[in-house]
Image (cartoon, helix red, strand yellow):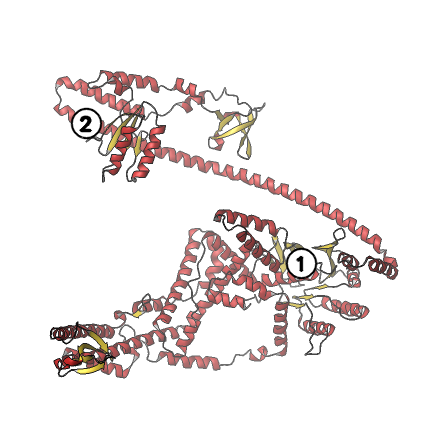
Amino acid sequence: MHTEAISNSIASQCSQMQLCNCNHFLYPQNSPIIYRHHRKLIRNRKPTVLSVANSPKLRLSESLQQETLLSLEWPTLCHQLSSFTQTSMGHAVVQKAQIPFGKSLEESQKLLNQTSAALAMMQSQPLDLSTIEDITGILNSAVSGQLLSPSEICAVRRTLRAVNNVWKKLTEAAELDGDSLQRYSPLLELLKNCNFLTELEEKIGFCIDCKLLIILDRASEDLELIRAERKRNMENLDSLLKKVAAQIFQAGGIDKPLITKRRSRMCVGIKASHKYLLPDGIALNVSSSGATYFMEPKEAVEFNNMEVRLSNSEIAEETAILSLLTAEIAKSEREIKYLMDRVLEIDLAFARAGFAQWMDGVCPILSSQSHVSFDSSINIEGIKHPLLLGSSLRSLSAASSNSNPLKSDVESSEMTVGSLSEGISDFPVPIDIKVECETRVVVITGPNTGGKTASMKTLGLASLMSKAGLYLPAKNHPRLPWFDLILADIGDHQSLEQNLSTFSGHISRIVDILELVSRESLVLIDEIGSGTDPSEGVALATSILQYLRDRVGLAVVTTHYADLSCLKDKDTRFENAATEFSLETLRPTYRILWGSTGDSNALNIAKSMGFDRKIIQRAQKLVERLRPERQQHRKSEFYQSLMEERRKLESQARTAASLHAEIMDLYQEIEDEAKDLDRRAAHLKAKETQQVQQELNFVKVQIDTVVQDFQNRLRDASADEINSLIKESESAIAAIVEAHRPDDDFSVSETNTSSFTPQFGEQVHVKSLGDKLATVVEVPGDDDSVLVQYGKMRVRVKKNNIRPIPNSKRKNAANPAPRLRKQQEDRQSGSAGSSNEEASYGPRVQTSKNTLDLWGMRVEEASHQLDIALACWESRSVLFVIHGMGTGVVKERVLEILRNHPRVAKYEQESPMNYGCTVAYIK
């Protein structure tokens, strides 16, 4: 009756298929569908800025910015950055060059602050984001009404848990140090107001075992009842079939009992010739040979029917639970996607930090905007082209790792660091970019292949990187303005499809740029006015630059037209720059000379390329004839002399900077050592105090043991034995005191410090250096000061601040220990049971100094330690060897070594007073 009631209840529930069957949760039915309709309403709501988004000017702006990114090779830089992302979401975004730019100065500064916080976090406690999965597709499936599988639901749970762990690690790192809270606040702000959906995570964990990907019995009461009833039904069915199979086997109907499943029903195997043994059985299947029938006994029909019903009920209940969890995930779609967006920002921040660490970047300073005029001042020192630097770093690291694969990891890493630092200084050539505040147009001239375009691209990439929160591969503190638009006309825009020549392609791009520029824009134009008649090209380029002068934040152009360099003479808002060219090597140096005008050096470059000398000479005569008033040769000589003088001054400046760096390093080393003295002194004092306290406790225990032994023996002693007991106890206590008497070297040597005069090259103890050994490099002068050297550091100290190294002869003369030891031997010689041989080995009292503890060691390790101790132990002394009991293997090995060692005079095995310890007498 109980089985039928449950079966009827399950059948009615399965027919209704309502989500409220799961008694642990109460939610509206069909919530995914309701949520799906809600999303449709949101999608159909048209944004108010739709007309603006479709405006031609905005489309033109987006098109030009995308072309600028391609011209500056921004996707290539993003490809380098993508290797530092940890999540699949971050990797996809960076690979597509879709990393966010700051839409204002504040937003870009916020991105830079996030990068700085991530860099500080990486240096103290790295954060692992690789366990966070991209569950966007799962969320979309849930919202569309599709039923999620247990693996998909568990993916949501793992991601929520991983994000929660990220938040906990960030807060823990910030709480470790009070000063760290401000450093990590840009990262904490990202997750500060997020809903981590811990309830949803707990619900999923309560219902599903994410390791086995199965729904647990506790997910609902009905599921638990169904599975319990199914288990009981299967036990009954199995018991019945085993009994039937055994009867068939005994009757010869089968070679061995066989229970199997056919057509989702449990049955038994039986030979075709013995089907009569199951007269009312149902044949479910036949073997391929026809010799064996798989039959369901009549008694098992009802059990199999119940198994089918319970199995269908279990599937229905599991589906209801999965539907409920799917609805819950769909309901939380907004919170989860918002959380994933914040995680993406954190991943990008750590990617930017890793990228900065890889290329040794520094944080740029974005200059604030003035209400009166735009501040276009740029001061970037030693910046390297990011793409050239990235390729250089990769090639150097690959070369260092492949140079010798047999080297150890340590050697390989040292070689890599050394080769990287050596190679980075050579390529790419760092350049300085310095633009004054009032400058609006910079004209760069110089030879072909001299680096004009690369320098301009470097400035463009630096502006993009600072807007996106990336560090710059430069020195010191680079400073540059924040540009709202960065527009570039670089490369050949010739198009046969659009019927555009090289010149018309450039002009069409410049027309679009002039339409979009603002007072906060950066414009980069390569070879302005080229591709047409030189006179017309100069006139057009001059007019364009004068137009840009009044309408942009900064415009940087490259040209071979010398007339454009004369604009600076008429207007201070123009500035000139030139790429340096060496007439000695006939090669460009790839350096930018700000405020200078460069020559194209076309004839010199042609000469270095192997042109016929006669052609070069004829060309030089034509140049002089065309420009006789400029006195080209004289100007070049004067220019080269200035460049030579400049190189000398720069070399001297580098030497001075190197010496200054060495002096600062030495100063820092001395300052750190001085600051560390107080800490080390306190540490040593605490350590010595702890050791003395341990010795005192040990001595107290030993004396208490002697007193206790004396009291115990005194109760049973006669009057004649009392004196002997007193002497014996006094002797033992005196021996304990003598064994722990401190050395008097220091106190004796202190008395002679005042009369001590150090000599050159002598080693002395310096008190202010933690009593470290130092070498005298200058004898005391009139002011009683001594110059000593400790490692690389030289320090001048007072004479009373040093003391000599103790002399061994003086030590022996001043040490009263031999006299006390002699008195002790005299006492022991008069006591009962003593001998001259035992007295010669000193007091037989165990201390920490004469004990070798082998407890818990393996046989090989214990043997090694005992051999070392016996070889270096003091002659005519006692050694207490603690070996314990255990299995007795270590003890047997110790006794064997002591028995055969040449330095051991004799040894005494353990006694009730020294359990687990053997005493050895050293010759």
Q: Residue at x 36, y 70 (%)?
A: 151
Disc assigned to residue 256 = none
User: Would residue 774 be visible to someone looking at this image?
Assistant: yes
**Residue type for callout 1:** Ser
Q: Position of residue 643 (x, y in %)?
A: 75, 50
Q: Please tell me whether mark 1 sits on a helix, a strand or a loop.
A: loop
Check disc 2 and report the residue beneath it: 709
Q: From the viewer's perspective, is residue 391 above or below residue 858?
A: below
Q: Nearer the viewer, mark 1 or mark 2?
A: 2
Which image quarter: residue 793?
Answer: top right
Say if 547 sits above or below 860 in the image: below
| Label 2 crowd (10 A; few <14 / some 14-19 / many >=20) | few
Q: Is residue 883 visible?
A: no
Of the residues shown, which amino acid type is indicated by label 2?
Answer: Asp
Residue in the picture at 41% in, 76% down: 141
The quarter holding residue 436 reads bottom right
The alpha-carbon separation of the residues under discs 1 and 2 comes to 91 Å
Under circle 2, the secondary element is: helix
x and y percentages locating residue 563 in the rendered image? 80, 63
Badge 1: how crowded within 10 Å, few (<14), some, or many (20+)?
A: many
Relative side of 109 to 742, left or right: right
x, y (%) of residue 524? 68, 65
In this rendering, is residue 154 above or below 35? above
Report the residue marked by disc 1: 377
